[in-house]
Amino acid sequence: MDRLTTDILVVGSGPAGSTVAKYAAEKGVQVTFIERRHEVGVPVRCGEFLPDVDEIRTMFPLADDLEGTFDLPSEMKLVETDRIRLVNPKNKATDIPMNGYTIDRDRYDQYLADEAIRSGATLIKDCLFKNIDGNKAITTQGEIEYKVIIGADGPGSRVARSLGLQRNHRPYPAVTAQAKGDFDPIVVMYFGGIAPGAYSWIIPKKGQANVGVGFSPKFADGTLSEYFDKFAKKNNFDIITKIEGKHVPSEGPIPKTVSGNGMVVGDAAGHVISVNGGGIPLARIAGRICGNIAADNIVSGRPLQDYEVEWRRVMEKPLKTAAFNKKLADTFAFSGPEWMVTMCMGILGKRRMNNLIRCKRIFP
C-alpha cells in the first residue's frame, strides 16, 4: 500500500478500535482500521477480566443495548467468577460480589477484529500511524486519505497529539504475566503489601492466572520489575510467559475527544475506570457510539460533536466519580505508610468498597 482512500480511518485494533470499525461498517460506509503490530492482541497487556452485562449496567445505566454490545461465544469465557477479593497490607480480605468472567485477551481482540471485518471493514496490520497531513494519515505503509479519523491507539495516542487533543496525564505503569497452576475462581486485588502506592492482582484462568502489578509513580520509589518479582516470590508463582507492560490512564477522561474531523476513544480518551484500571467495557460502549456517529457523519452530515455529547451523557458521571474516589485514596491512603491503607480500608468497610469498585460515591 502506497496510497489509500477511505471514508473512516480507525487507528488501533483493540476493543475500542474494532468496535468503532464494526458499527461504522454496518452502516455501509468504507472503513479501514490499522494495527501497528503483526498480530492483533499480541502481546497481552491487561488483566483479562470482564464484568457481566448486569454489572456493567449497574455502573453505566444509561448505556444502550448492552446485551448486543457484549455478546460473546460461551467458549471464550474461561472462568466465571462471582466476587472480587480486596486484600489490605495486613492480609485481611473483604469479598465484594461481582459477577464476571475471564478471557484470553489475544483471542478476544482477534474475535472483535474479525467481527469488524465480517461487517465490511478492512484491517491493515504492520501499519504504524505517524502523523496527520491535511486529510491524510502518514503511516509506515504509505498515505491514507480519509474523511473522518478515529484514534483508538492507547493512552499515549499519536492521533490525539496530531489532532491537538490532550493526552492522558500521569498514567500508571503496570506489568502482567501468566502464572501456571490451579487458582480459586475469585479475582483477588491486593493494595499495598509490596510497596507504597502499589497494587497487584490474581485473575484466574484455565490452568493458569493473569498476575500483575501496577503502581503510582508519585508514591512508589522502586521499579515495576522489582515489585513484580517481590509479588511473584511472595506467592510462589510459576511464571510461564514474558512479563509485558503498559500504561493505564488514571485520572478520568480527557477534556475534549473531538477536534475537526477527528475523534479519540478508549484509552486514548481516558475511558478507563480510575479505581481499578478497567477499560474494555468503556471501550466497547464508547466505541459503539463513536462508530455509529462517524458513519452518520459520512452518510448524512451528522456533527461529530454528537459523539462528545453522547458518550459523556452515558459515561462521564461514573468516570468522574471513580477519578474523584481515586484522588481520595491517593490523598488519605497511598500517600503515607501502609498502615494508612489498612486503616482506610477498615474505615470504608464492605459497603463503601462495593461502591468504590462500582464507580459510585463512597461518602454522601
Image (cartoon, rainbow, N blue to C red):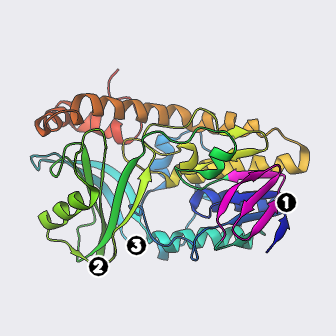
Is residue 333 visible to the viewer in this orientation of the structure? yes
Q: Secondary structure at mark 1?
A: loop
Q: From the viewer's perspective, tell me whether residue 41 is left or right of residue 257.
A: left
Residue 226 percent across, percent down from the top left:
21, 60
**The C terminus lies in which quarter of the figure?**
top left
Question: Of the numbered discs in the image, which one, if any, rests on residue 240?
Answer: 2
Quarter of the N terminus within the rendering = bottom right
Q: Position of residue 114 (x, y in %)?
A: 65, 73
Hey, which quadrant is residue 259 in on the image? top right
Q: Which residues are magenta?
A: 127-150
Q: CA distance from mark 1 to mark 3?
A: 35 Å
Q: Residue furthest right?
A: 300
Mark 1 or mark 3: which comes first in sequence? 1
Q: Which residue is mark 1?
A: 29
Q: Which residue is mark 3?
A: 78
Q: Secondary structure at mark 3?
A: loop
Residue drawn at x 68%, y 46% as measured from the top left: 162
Q: Is residue 203 above or below residue 219?
A: below
Instruction: Identify which amino acid the numbered label 3 is placed on.
Output: Leu
Q: Please, what is the dominant secondary structure of the magenta stretch? A: strand
Question: Can residue 264 be seen in this snapshot?
Answer: no
- Residue in the image at 37% along x and 52% along y: 173
Residue at (46, 71) in percent of width and height: 43
Q: Nearer the viewer, mark 2 or mark 3?
A: 2
